[in-house]
Image (tube, rainbow, N blue to C red):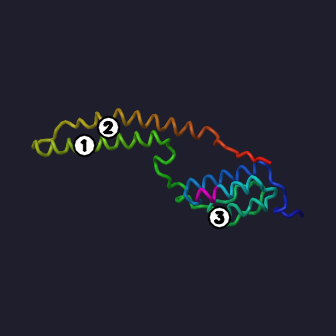
Amino acid sequence: MVDQQKIRASDRDRQQVVERLRSALEDGRLTMEEYVNRMEVAYQAATYGDLAPLCTDLPASSPVTGGPPRSAGATAPAAVASRAGYLAGLPTVLKVLWTIWLVAVSVNVVVWALVSGTGGHLAYPWPVWVAGPYGAVLFAVSAAATLFRRSRPPVVHRQRVNA
């Protein structure tokens, strides 16, 4: 029988490892320096044995298909894996727009509450007209951006090596 560690890795195997490392970088599990170092090793790897150590200290199992056996405790719990923030996958522009919207709505609600409290009666809830239409538009644009990003494969930038 052939030792799995000595089987040659394909470009796809190397790319899967790099994608896993990128995910770990985005999760804050790796520093940029660690990511760059491991990425370089992954692109230079010839066998599964060269790729295996790159993801051993990361919680998700090794993405190398057909590679070395996966350890039983290597998968992340579902609750931890799904704890990304609501705005985590959005472009920065949309994050800023959501923040501006939230501040504007909060100020309007506070002004409405002060007017209602000092006036002795409950005033017409006009902040709904600030929150509703703009919030609906932001939600639609955010949903479209999320769907668009998920439908595209991740962009991979390979470094050129001058020999």
Quarter of the view holding residue 35: bottom right
Tell me which secondary structure the magenta stretch mostly adopts.
Answer: helix
Point out residue 75 in the picture as x, y percentages from the top left corner: 63, 61
Q: Amino acid at mark 2?
A: Ala
Which of the image's four quarters has the N terminus? bottom right
Q: Point out the residue furthest to the left here.
A: 120
Label at residue 74: 3
Point out residue 41 in the picture as x, y percentages from the top left corner: 73, 57
Point out residue 130 in the picture as x, y percentages from the top left corner: 29, 35
Q: Amino acid at mark 1?
A: Val
Mark 2 vs 1: CB contact within 8 A: yes
Could you tell me which secondary element the residue under label 3 belongs to?
Answer: loop
Q: Amino acid at mark 3?
A: Ala
Q: Residue at x 12, y 41 (%)?
A: 121
Q: Residue at x 75, y 63 (%)?
A: 69
What residue is pinned by disc 1?
Answer: 109
Give the number of marks: 3
**What's the magenta region?**
31-35
Q: Residues within 10 Å of mark 1 (few under 14, many from 20)?
A: some
Label at residue 43: none
Q: Residue 4 versus residue 49: which sits nearer the camera? A: 49
Specify which label sits upstream in the sequence, 3 or 1: 3
Q: Gap between marks 2 and 1, in whole Å?
A: 9 Å
Q: Residue 35 versus residue 63: which sits nearer the camera? A: 35
Q: Residues within 10 Å of mark 2 (few under 14, many from 20)?
A: some
Rendered view: 123 above or below 32: above
Specify which label sits upstream in the sequence, 3 or 2: 3
Rendered view: 36 above or below 115: below
What residue is pinned by disc 2?
Answer: 131
Residue 63 among those drawn in magenta: no
